[in-house]
Image: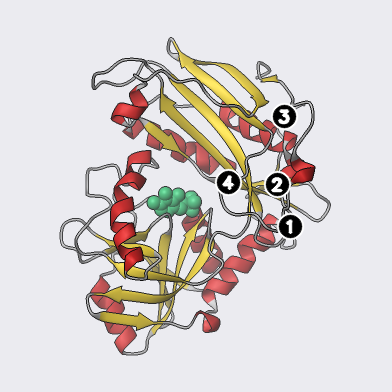
Amino acid sequence: MNNLKITKIKESRASSIDFDNLSFGKTFTDHMYVADYIDGEWTNMEIRPLENLSVHPGNLAWHYGQSIFEGMKATRDEAGTPLLFRPEEHIYRLNASARRMCMPEISEEMFLEAVHSLVKLEKDWIPSPEGSALYIRPFMFATDEAIGVRPSDTYKFIICTLPVGPYYPKPVKLKAEETYIRAAQGGVGEAKTAGNYAASLYPAKLAKEEGYDQIMWLDAKEFKYVQEVGTMNIFFVIGDEVITPATTGTILKGITRKTIIEILKDEGYKVTERPITIDEVVEANKKGELKEVFGTGTAAVIAVVDEIKFRDYVMHLNPDNYIVAKLAKSTINGLRNRTIADTRGWVVEAGATIDA
Ligand SMILES: *Cc1c(COP(=O)(O)O)cnc(C)c1O
């Protein structure tokens, strides 16, 4: 593909940024990638200076929610080479979200060309401090200008990049939720679609008022099985078993989750994907067998949990003693800055697949 137009900014803002003090999600790089879906195909692929969009008030995405996204990270090795982590996994999942939301898919070739080209262009924006990265936010939304519930005929696909510091500087406190749900069987819980997060805001606000950082979602039918947390999948270490809920339709299939399962299995851990009830977690805690609880996701990487509340029962954990979470985190971070050799083909140099 050679039809990507690149229009560069006159002078980069990168040198004016304090990369040691980034708050998550507020600083955008100089450029963005934009493409349009018109008459059944993707067209107008362009990398251009970041700017506002002009959108009609009838934009279908605003009214009926056809909007999906991804979250990835670029890092650098000691020589400054920009690196991507398992980028193809993100286009597979973006397309799975697109199918569920009745939106057009994007070819792997188009997606990879976009991500590689943009990250290569913005490589001076990749922060070097430990735990920092260039967050990559690909997203797609409907653009038909009409009121009426139906799938849009036109769409925009955009990628923005943002230098970010650590997502959770401290251990997180979770509240197991028994009133509200995140996703039901047959719903859209497996899709990375905007409405899932809108629906989570009110229950998350209530949890914050009680002093909890995030909600631990239980299943929608019985409020019995643990699902996931905010924007992370969840892992428990009980005795010598590492357990994460099986993804059977209501849980977002995290790429960090998949990566950590593989890393821990290779390290010789017994890792099980299976349904796990909140009662089992409570029982394990009472018996002193609940060793670790942590969340996994691209933004947070690994977030250790130091407290879980279920009804009136509060479990206190000590992340200073976590072994599995520490190993998973140091391995992922080491792969991402190439201080640990990548034997699985997960780490790719940004720009490696394009001529530019
Ligand atoms: C993105 C996301 C995750 C984590 O997925 P990763 O691919 O590891 O970033 C987990 N749960 C939800 C609800 C998410 O949106």
In the figure, residue 10 lies in which quadrant? top right
| Rendering coords of residue 308 (x, y %) | 35, 75
Question: In this orientation, does residue 65 appear?
Answer: yes
Question: On the image, numbered disc 4 is attached to which residue?
Answer: 26
State the residue position of label 1: 338
Sequence-wise, the earlier of marks 3 and 4 is: 4
Name the residue carrying label 3. 354
Is the Cβ of the residue at disc 3 closer than 8 Å to that at disc 4? no
**Neighbour class for label 3 at 10 Å: few (<14), some, many (≥20)?**
some
First in residue order: circle 2 vs circle 3: 2
Q: Secondary structure at mark 1?
A: loop
- As drawn, 290 above or below 48: below
Q: Earlier in the sequence, mark 1 or mark 3?
A: 1
Q: Amino acid at mark 2?
A: Leu
Query: How far is mark 4 from mark 1, CA to CA?
Result: 27 Å
Q: Residue at x 75, y 42 (%)?
A: 14
Q: Quadrant of the N terminus?
A: top right
User: What residue does disc 2 label?
Assistant: 83
- Please name whichever residue, 317 or 240, is drawn nearer the observer in this view of the structure: 317
- Judged by depth in the image, the label closer to the viewer, 4 or 1, is 4
